[in-house]
Amino acid sequence: MPYFLAYEQLNDLIHALNALGYRCLGPQVQDGAIVFDDLADAKQLPWGMRDAQKPGHYRLQKSELNEAFAWANGPQAIKPLLFKPKESLWRVERDATGAFTFKETLPEQKPIALIGARACDLAGMAVQDKTLLQGKYVDAQYRWHREHLLIIAVNCSYSGGNCFCVSTKTGPKATSGYDLALTEIQNGFVVEVGSDKGRDLINTLHCHEAEAAKIAAAAQRSSDAANMQTKRMPKDNSRALRDILMNNLEHPRWQEVAERCLSCGNCTAVCPTCFCHHQTEHPTVDGDGSVHAREWDSCFTEGHSYIHGQVVRDTTEKRYKQWLTHKLGTWWDQFDTSGCVGCGRCVTWCPVGIDLTEEMAAIAGESNVVVAKEEKDP
Amino acid sequence: MEETKPRIAIHKFTSCDGCQLAFLHLGEDLLKLAEKVDIVHFVEMGPINPTAKVDVAYVEGSISTPEEAKRIREIRANSRYLVTIGACATAGGIQALRNFADTKSWMQAIYATPETISTLDTATAISNHVKVDYEIYGCPVNSQQVLASLLSLLQKVTPTARRDKVCLECKRLGYVCVMVAKGEPCMGPVTHTGCGALCPSLGRGCYACYGPAENINTDALTQWLSSLGLSDAEISRRFLFIQNSAPGFKEAGLKLKKKVP
């Protein structure tokens, strides 16, 4: 049974998380965007803010509602917390006898409670779980962060101009992966419990069960957000895209997009499922030790396709083709899912506004624009 | 033991002296480094021996006088490896703007007795004059990159550097894109990584002081900057700035300059 958490209880929630030993992160306005940072008081939340998103364009503006979560998404959410942009993997040290010893470096930090993850962020995390947690090889660092993360999701009540999670079936309402899920309604939130940790947490807050009218209002918010979406992924992001892409490797569109693409890698960095990285050695000057670290890399760099003396993908056309065919196509072969969760970040944060749904539409011959309901069935 | 230490020299040509500071800024690591190598010529730090034979010569600055054109050949002959550091040494630097102007008329406009000044008509990169083994970009270069290059050479390993765009580093550090979120013109998508996305970290656009990254698309960036409201002259100046003579930037800048009435 869902609960109701009043606005006045948000600080109780933050305090309860702190009491349980969590570092609490929540959305707030910084540098012209909604980003996640330490949250000590509910006042820090982006009350009354809304994001306007277009390809290559993100602006915050005042919303007509004085709500805390009346926005779609910011440049990042869960990915940098679990699959960190830079992280050391192991350390090697020369001991007193001159022998080298290798030591795994696991994170030493407080567990994190994240408030405000969206359904698309959770879907992205589920895809990264497949890659880094559920395969033959488990990533030790990712697992550590994953086991030390508590997620309080917030269901969207608004969709930005680049959102298309309805077509990818990953939102706008979260269905799994959260400890608690909130839906903002008048004066507070309808709260759904997703885990034992979430249940223990809500029990400390003495919330009342939400009455039917509140539950209906929450359902309406999710449905309003879904109806706002104007963008879609052709073929509803299905496995069919794999064959369409692989059968069109010589399509003229690849050259056209390469003329616009900066090959900068921003799309891959903001994508919640991209996991490519490189590893580097950081030796001490005296030669007595070294830290082996990894950093986010991208299929848009030369280093990423450098194999034994040559760069395999030396042109932007090859790199863009790699990105799209993997993300929407061969991801299915590898992980039995699409690599796209419909968050639209790669569209918004592309410095020249390249829209992957539009590129896919050009190759698939199916529109990326949602036909309004009234037009479909009058 | 002393004689077996590798010998290092740091030379200066036409430049502001800022890149050499990359060594001095190493702090404690400089002391450790000094135990491993002999720094035989480094005017900014003390030792002076400009004609010494060395294992690695680090060269700062561009070639802009007849004396410099001669001196760099001597340094090349005296050095096993020659590494250039900074925009001046790798691409001519800000002073290479003279390459697009009439040096003589500039001299006459500025100096009382221009005939007493011995200078070339151009300021050019070290690699235009002698073989360079490794180049480190930046204005100024980053201490850690310089140190990494030397540690690699000491281990007899070819130094490597990421040639990615600034954007990736900006994203790794969690900075909000100034171009997407504020419409601030930014050269990050064509600029070589290495600075730690310093300008975007302060909310301003990258001004390309690290020079061109690999596989850049100057036409696409030009078009986008134009859509943000920049004139051809303004975009041209962004390419023809500190790295004005670097391949890619020079062509992009001059193409736009020609369009300016």
Image (spheres, rainbow, N blue to C red):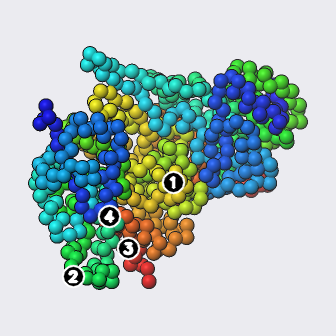
Q: Of callouts 2 and 1, which one flags the residue occurring earlier in the amino acid sequence? A: 2
The residue to which callout 3 is attached is B255
Q: In the depicted view, which residue is nearer to us: A245 or A353?
A: A353
Helix or strand or loop: what does disc 4 sit on?
loop
Q: Of callouts 3 and 2, which one flags the residue occurring earlier in the amino acid sequence? A: 2
Q: CA distance from mark 2 to mark 4?
A: 24 Å
Residues marked 3 and 2 touching at CB (< 8 Å): no
Q: Of callouts 3 and 4, which one flags the residue occurring earlier in the amino acid sequence? A: 4
Amino acid at the residue labelled 3: Lys
The chain that hosts pointer 3 is B
Q: CA distance from mark 1 to mark 3?
A: 27 Å
Task: Report crowding for label 1: few under 14, some 14 to 19, many 20 or more residues within 10 A (C-alpha).
Answer: many
The chain that hosts pointer 1 is B
Residue A186 appears left or right of B145: right
Q: In the depicted view, which residue is nearer to us: B234 or B121?
A: B121
Residue at 45% of width from left, 56% of height from top? B188
Q: Of callouts 1 and 3, which one flags the residue occurring earlier in the amino acid sequence? A: 1
The residue to which callout 4 is attached is B93
Task: Report crowding for label 2: few under 14, some 14 to 19, many 20 or more residues within 10 A (C-alpha).
Answer: few
Q: CA distance from mark 2 to mark 1?
A: 44 Å
Q: Which of the two marks, 3 or 2, is nearer to us in this view?
A: 2
Q: Which of the two marks, 1 or 3, is nearer to us in this view?
A: 1
The residue to which callout 1 is attached is B200
The residue to which callout 2 is attached is B115
Residues marked 2 and 1 touching at CB (< 8 Å): no
